[in-house]
Image: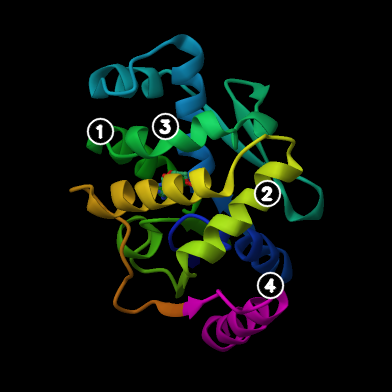
Amino acid sequence: MVAVDGPAGAGKSTVARQLADQLGFLYLDTGAMYRALSYKALRRGVDLRDEAALAELLADTVVELYPASEGRVRVILDGQDVTDSLRSPEINASVAVVAGFASVRTEMVARQRELARHGGVVMDGRDIGTFVLPHADVKFYLTASLDARAERRYRELVKMGFDVGLDRIRDEIQHRDMLDSSRPYAPLSMAPDAVPIDTTDLEVEEVMAQMLEICRRRLS
Ligand code: DC
């Protein structure tokens, strides 16, 4: 089992996906699970500050993650493919609130552990090495400067056709970092036994090379 944690825009999903592909493991994007719940809550008009309502909604929600071409993941929410709807600015702005509630996290973590039960997974998120899979064979903690992370998210959103400003993205990421790091329950933090990688000035290939080498050593 490989855990990949770090703040928004550090490049986790790109490298976790490729790493899973190279190792022949399953890639599990835990952020997508929180995003899917946020999507459903927004669609249903559920108050995002209402923890009990969100927990109830989650109890009645099935989120499935399926491998797709090029190492991508398709997210199926209650039988419907919502993959292309989960990275909108609206969800970016609300998901950290949803992910902040203990009762939501407890249920999500139980589901994530179940998905990883048979091993052979690369799981990316915020609390994987510290909380979800504390016994993972390899743990990585990816970081990058706020500017680099904002730039990456900006390019991603523009490519998807959203009309957004870089400054706003930077503010949103900073706000999300703050929410993710300061929540009382399983906040974003680096596991003491994680390998830190600062991706600010690295190409994806360089990050991948470092990670693969460490995985091959530790997983053999
Ligand atoms: O990685 P991402 O941007 O798709 O994550 C979306 C949000 O979900 C982000 O605000 C942090 C939260 N999250 C979390 O709290 N724990 C996880 N394991 C994964 C994501």
Q: Which quadrant of the view contains residue 204?
A: bottom right
Q: Quadrant of the C terminus?
A: bottom right
Observer-nearest of 217 and 102: 102
The residue labelled by disc 1 is 103
Does any atom of ligand 1 lie closer than 8 Å to the CB of label 2? no
Neighbour tally class for label 3: few under 14, some 14-19, many 20 plus, Cα within 10 Å: some
Looking at the rendered structure, the kind of residue marked 4 is Val
In primary-sequence order, the first of circles 1 and 2 is 1
Q: Nearer the viewer, mark 1 or mark 2?
A: 2
Magenta residues, start to end: 197-220
Give the residue drawn at x 47%, y 22%: 61
Alpha carbons under labels 4 and 1: distance apart: 35 Å
User: Mark 1 near mark 2, Cβ–Cβ under 8 Å?
Assistant: no
Looking at the rendered structure, the kind of residue marked 2 is Glu
Looking at the rendered structure, the kind of residue marked 3 is Ser
In primary-sequence order, the first of circles 3 and 4 is 3
Give the residue drawn at x 65%, y 60%: 14
Q: Is residue 207 magenta?
A: yes
User: Mark 4 near mark 2, Cβ–Cβ under 8 Å?
Assistant: no
Looking at the rendered structure, the kind of residue marked 1 is Ser
In primary-sequence order, the first of circles 4 and 2 is 2
What SS does tag 1 mark?
helix
Judged from this view, the residue extending furthest toward the top is 45
